[in-house]
Image (cartoon, rainbow, N blue to C red):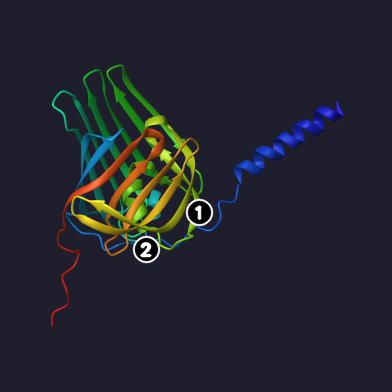
């Protein structure tokens, strides 16, 4: 009996240690010079074949603050990022639209909506973030499933990772741990972020000097490239495990959030 108590006590201590794992210090996010209406078009290749076009648009908005988000002001400036993925071949039917809304100052997620249509299935999934939790609803042809997911102390939305990483200081050696919310799977996954050195990336708009950021997930690593110069555009990514690459093909800047000071 005493041996059983020791084993149980050790197990409890192990569980407690996992729950209070120290993720280390989080670097101070540096909000880039967002552009209202900025539009970027990417080409997605798999096994060296171009298969999809991804169009990402940023738009400024504002809304009434929420107590769940500890807002100290009533009007909260937000950024709406919309990513529409379409096939390059008419022979394939695929449509994937993702829209995320987050606060513009600290990129805290507010809402996410995703709609996917293929020739054999379709679904819609929404996520609404509150204080320490997210309400997720998934709608398929079989019906609707809802679930409230309790969140760890530090988290970000997987749906907005391309945009969110633009706020990471592009300083070589910067590293930290985080948790990503994956609404499609009703779960969070641990992730390690590591900022590497510079890399010259050839794109459809010319050669761009970038900083490489590696996302280390439980089952794979993904390399993201961000322009060193403001507004730190997302230039592309490489997912070696899935033989997938994404590169910027065209870019349309827009007006800044505020007008320059009068001379």
The residue tagged with tag 1: helix, strand or loop?
Answer: strand
Query: Which residue is at the far bottom?
Result: 263
Residue 176 in the image: above or below residue 133: below
Q: What residue sits 48% from the left and 35% below the top?
A: 219
The residue tagged with tag 2: helix, strand or loop?
Answer: loop
Relative image position of residue 88 (x, y in whole percent) = 17, 33
Left or right, 23 with reference to 7: left
Q: What residue sits 37% from the left and 31% below the top?
A: 184
Query: Which residue is at the far right?
Result: 2
Q: What residue sits 13% from the left and 79% below the top?
A: 262
- Dot 2 corresponds to which residue? 30
Left or right, 154 with reference to 168: right
Q: What residue sits 20% from the left and 56% below the top?
A: 206
Residue 187 in the image: above or below residue 23: above
Residue 17 in the image: above or below residue 174: above
- Dot 1 corresponds to which residue? 176
Q: Is residue 31 visible?
A: yes
Q: Are marks 2 and 1 in contact (CB under 8 Å)?
A: no
CA separation in Å, label 2 and label 1? 15 Å
Relative image position of residue 57 (x, y in whole percent) = 20, 48
For this rendering, which residue is in front, 196 or 83?
Answer: 196
Mark 2 vs 1, N-terminal side? 2
Left or right, 127 with reference to 249: right
Q: Is residue 110 visible?
A: no
Q: How many marks?
A: 2
Relative image position of residue 90 (x, y in whole percent) = 13, 26
For this rendering, which residue is in front, 18 or 245?
Answer: 245
């Amino acid at each position: 009996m005493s041996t059983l108590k020791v084993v149980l006590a050790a197990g409890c201590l192990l569980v407690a240690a996992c729950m209070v794992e120290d993720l280390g210090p989080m670097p101070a996010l540096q909000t880039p010079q967002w552009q209202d209406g900025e539009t970027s078009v990417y080409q997605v290749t798999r096994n060296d074949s171009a298969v999809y076009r991804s169009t990402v648009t940023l738009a400024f908005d504002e809304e009434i603050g929420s107590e769940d988000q500890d807002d100290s002001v009533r009007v909260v400036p937000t950024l709406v990022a919309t990513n529409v993925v379409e096939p390059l071949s008419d022979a394939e039917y695929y449509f994937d639209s993702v829209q995320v809304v987050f606060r513009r100052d600290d990129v805290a997620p507010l809402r996410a909506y995703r709609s996917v249509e293929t020739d054999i299935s379709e679904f819609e999934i929404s996520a609404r973030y509150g204080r320490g939790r997210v309400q997720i609803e998934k709608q398929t042809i079989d019906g609707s499933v809802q679930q409230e997911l309790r969140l760890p102390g530090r988290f970000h939305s997987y749906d907005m990772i391309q945009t969110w990483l633009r706020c990471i200081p592009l300083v070589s050696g910067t590293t930290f741990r985080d948790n990503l919310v994956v609404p499609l799977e009703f779960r969070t996954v641990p992730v390690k972020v590591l900022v590497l050195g510079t890399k010259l990336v050839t794109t459809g708009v010319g050669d761009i000097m970038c900083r490489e950021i590696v996302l280390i997930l439980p089952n794979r690593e993904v390399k993201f490239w961000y322009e060193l110069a403001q507004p730190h555009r997302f230039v592309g990514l490489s997912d070696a495990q899935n033989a997938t690459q994404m590169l910027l093909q065209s870019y349309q800047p827009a007006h800044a959030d505020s007008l320059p000071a009068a001379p």
